[in-house]
Image (spheres, rainbow, N blue to C red):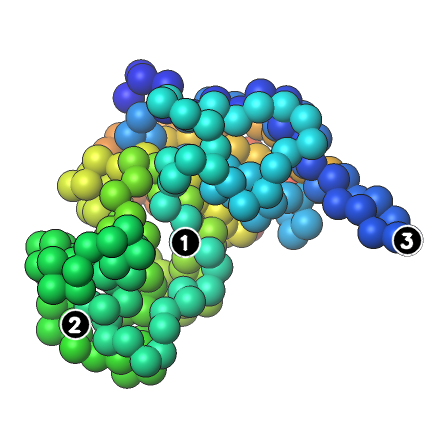
Amino acid sequence: MSTPLLSLREVSKSFHTRELSVKALEKISFTVNEGEFITIIGPSGSGKSTLFNILAGLLDSDEGSVDFVGGAAGECKVGYMPQRDLLLPWRRVIDNATLPLEAAGMSRKGARTQVAEHLESFGLAEFQRSYPAELSGGMRQRAALLRTVTTGRRTLLLDEPFGALDAITRRHMQDWLLTVHRELHRTILFITHDVDEAVYLADRVIVLSSRPGRVIRELTVPLPRPREQQMTAEPGFGASVATLLSDLGLSHR
């Protein structure tokens, strides 16, 4: 994982209204290597989602640069999964997953054939004809991630995908996502407010300060892969969590 895929240099962003000006990000700089799993944590309002919107080309930065191998942000270099799954309630699971391919001009029949290759590994084979309202929270997130993967992008931006799930389902989804990451060889940037989750999933954790968001730490996680939930009892895991909690002004439990 030594090939640079993404580089951010001195990225800043402010929002302006008639009444006030709010600086969301200030001089954000870090690199991401191909195949890495990067988690991003920080207080609410630290600009995490703003950063993802810039990487996805939905917003322009005021200062600095975002460079992808082969092009700049906004040139369809990423697949972006926002906090809400945004599944279309009138389309079945398989047809929600085919949306990116259909939008690119592929026929629905051809798109279904391509998506069908992933249904089993995403645990959705028996639910492919179901509507979103018929799915559990975890299954909805799997369907939304399948749709994101269907874009074919090398880099996936996942904004708190497990935030609304109960603790047990969340752990199952963490392990499943790590399997998807390993098998599909994608680069993942993942926003979370859960420090334990940030450490368990990541190769590196990027810590943002309170607004304006600045990078205050890049922590390399000292755990081997593949990961198992039992690793959360290891000293290296606990030490990493304690360091991040301190960065966020919290005490280790």
Disc 3 residue type? Glu
Instruction: Check contact, mark 3 vs mark 2: CB within 8 A.
Output: no
Residue at which label 2 appears: 128
Disc 2 residue type? Gln
Question: N-terminal of the two: label 3 or label 2?
Answer: 3
Image location of residue 54, percent across then percent down: 55, 39
Image location of residue 183, percent across then percent down: 16, 41
* Foreground label between 1 and 3: 3
Q: How many marks?
A: 3
Q: Does 16 sit left or right of 42 as displayed?
A: right
Spatial CA span between label 3 and label 2: 49 Å
Disc 1 residue type? Met
Residue at which label 3 appears: 19
Residue at (42, 30) in percent of width and height: 204
- Per the image, label 3 sits on a secondary structure element best described as loop
Residue at which label 1 appears: 81
- Which is more toward the observer, 86 or 248? 86
Report if residue 124 is visible in the image: yes
In the picture, the quarter occupied by the N terminus is top left
Question: N-terminal of the two: label 1 or label 2?
Answer: 1
Q: Does 103 sit left or right of 50 as displayed?
A: left
Category of crowding for the residue at label 3, using alpha-carbon neighbours closer than 10 angstroms: few (below 14), some (14–19), many (at least 20): few
